Image (spheres, rainbow, N blue to C red):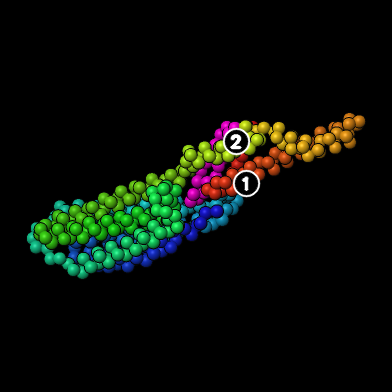
């Protein structure tokens, strides 16, 4: 089954780093009145709250399947990740953009001393965000070669940390640039524009995460290539003539439930019975008695569903073995 602990280490590392950064950025934003520093402080506060939501999602997704949720609670992590993404959009991006525009409208010209403490904090933030980004990327890779493919079915919790930290690194760069240009030119608009840039990239990040989590919540299906491979594997079994209907839905990170309706061919099962010699023995025993023949018919009526059921169970086990991302298989025969 899914590794529900995936992402926890990265989330905890990011949470600890952002609690520290949120405090010192907020203090400096109040002291300096910098729009870009204010945007960065809002960014860190939003990330702290959002990572708390991600931890809740990870914990709740660990709950085992029960009578109410027969396929487990894996979808919980996507719900809480969605809430986190909405928090980034409305709290992080919205407040940062609003404050930066307000600062831009009242930006004043004149000498702006370069605050070395503020610069030092931003550099520290760059290092901390870079470390948590590296940890999240390492956890996402899981020893695999780095490529864009590892992002396709990645855990949205891990993606949230990677995207947030990536945006944070970019945000710090914009804040540094804005403060430096304000110091060089004496124009406060550059500092406000730096904060505005942070807010905009936060908004892009949030929308990306919302779309990603939305796919899982409404029922993300398998890719067409995987579906074709599974259908081919099913049709290799002599009892399945062809697949009539195929449905799939994600129940956790890279774990899917599939429903398959197939055209069934019972002849191979009959041939297995015939090859075992059971029919010949039974025929020899009852060939002169109609009453015994009738009993055999009733016995066969009970035997056929068992044979079909055992064959379906074998087919389902083979599919799960061949395709590790398949957690549950339901086969309906026509």
73, 283: nearer the viewer: 283
Say which of 86 and 148 sits in front: 148
Residue occupying image coordinates x 65% and y 35%: 238
Q: Which residues are magenta?
A: 242-260
Mark 2 is surrounded, within 10 Å at the Cα level, by few (under 14), some (14 to 19) or many (20 or more) other residues, namely some
**Residue at x 56%, y 34% (from the top left corner):** 245
Please state the horizontal and vertical placement of residue 84, each as a whole percent of the image. 38, 54
Q: Residue furthest left?
A: 110
What percent of the width, then of the height, locates residue 35?
A: 20, 58
Residue 213 vertical position relative to residue 235 in the rendered view, above or below: below
Question: Horizontal placement of 205 versus 285: left or right?
Answer: left
In which quadrant of the rendered view does residue 179 lie?
bottom left
Residue 245: say if magenta: yes
Which residue is label 1 attached to? 317
Q: Is residue 253 magenta?
A: yes
Residue that label 2 marks: 235
Residue 126 visible in the picture: yes
Q: CA distance from mark 2 to mark 1?
A: 15 Å
Helix, strand or loop for disc 1: helix
SS at circle 2: helix
Front position in the image: 264 or 73: 264
Question: Residue 257 at x, y = what percent?
Answer: 55, 45
Foreground disc of the pair 2, 1:
2
- Check the image and report above or below for 231 versus 143: above
Which residue is located at x 70 percent, y 39 percent? 308
Q: Quadrant of the C terminus?
A: top right
Q: Residues within 10 Å of mark 1 (few under 14, many from 20)?
A: some
């Amino acid at each position: 089954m899914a590794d529900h602990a995936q992402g926890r280490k990265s989330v905890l590392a990011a949470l600890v780093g952002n609690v520290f950064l949120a405090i010192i950025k907020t203090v400096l934003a109040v002291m300096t009145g910098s729009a870009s520093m204010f945007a960065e402080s809002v960014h860190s506060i939003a990330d702290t709250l959002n990572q708390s939501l991600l931890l809740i999602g990870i914990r709740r997704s660990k709950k085992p399947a029960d009578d109410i949720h027969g396929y487990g609670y894996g979808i919980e992590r996507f719900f809480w990740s969605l809430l986190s993404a909405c928090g980034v959009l409305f709290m992080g991006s919205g407040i940062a953009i609003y404050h930066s525009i307000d600062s831009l409208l009242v930006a004043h010209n004149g000498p702006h001393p370069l605050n070395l403490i503020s610069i030092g904090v931003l550099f520290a933030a760059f290092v901390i965000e870079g470390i948590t980004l590296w940890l999240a990327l390492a956890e996402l890779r899981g020893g695999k070669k780095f490529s864009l493919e590892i992002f396709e079915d990645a855990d949205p919790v891990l993606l949230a940390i990677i995207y947030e930290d990536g945006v944070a690194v970019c945000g710090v760069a914009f804040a540094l640039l804005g403060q430096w240009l304000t110091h060089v030119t004496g124009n406060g608009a550059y500092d406000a524009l730096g904060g505005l840039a942070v807010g905009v990239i936060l908004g892009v990040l949030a929308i990306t995460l919302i779309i990603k989590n939305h796919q899982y919540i409404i029922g993300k299906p398998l890719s067409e290539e995987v579906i074709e491979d599974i259908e081919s594997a099913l049709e290799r079994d002599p009892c399945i003539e062809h697949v009539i209907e195929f449905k799939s839905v994600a129940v956790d990170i890279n774990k899917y439930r599939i429903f398959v309706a197939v055209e069934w061919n019972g002849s191979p099962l009959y041939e297995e019975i015939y090859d075992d010699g059971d029919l010949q023995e039974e025929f020899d025993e009852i060939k002169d008695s109609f009453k015994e023949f009738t009993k055999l018919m009733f016995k066969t009526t009970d035997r056929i569903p068992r044979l079909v059921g055992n064959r379906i169970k074998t087919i389902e086990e083979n599919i799960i073995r061949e395709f590790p991302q398949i957690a549950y298989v339901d086969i309906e025969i026509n």
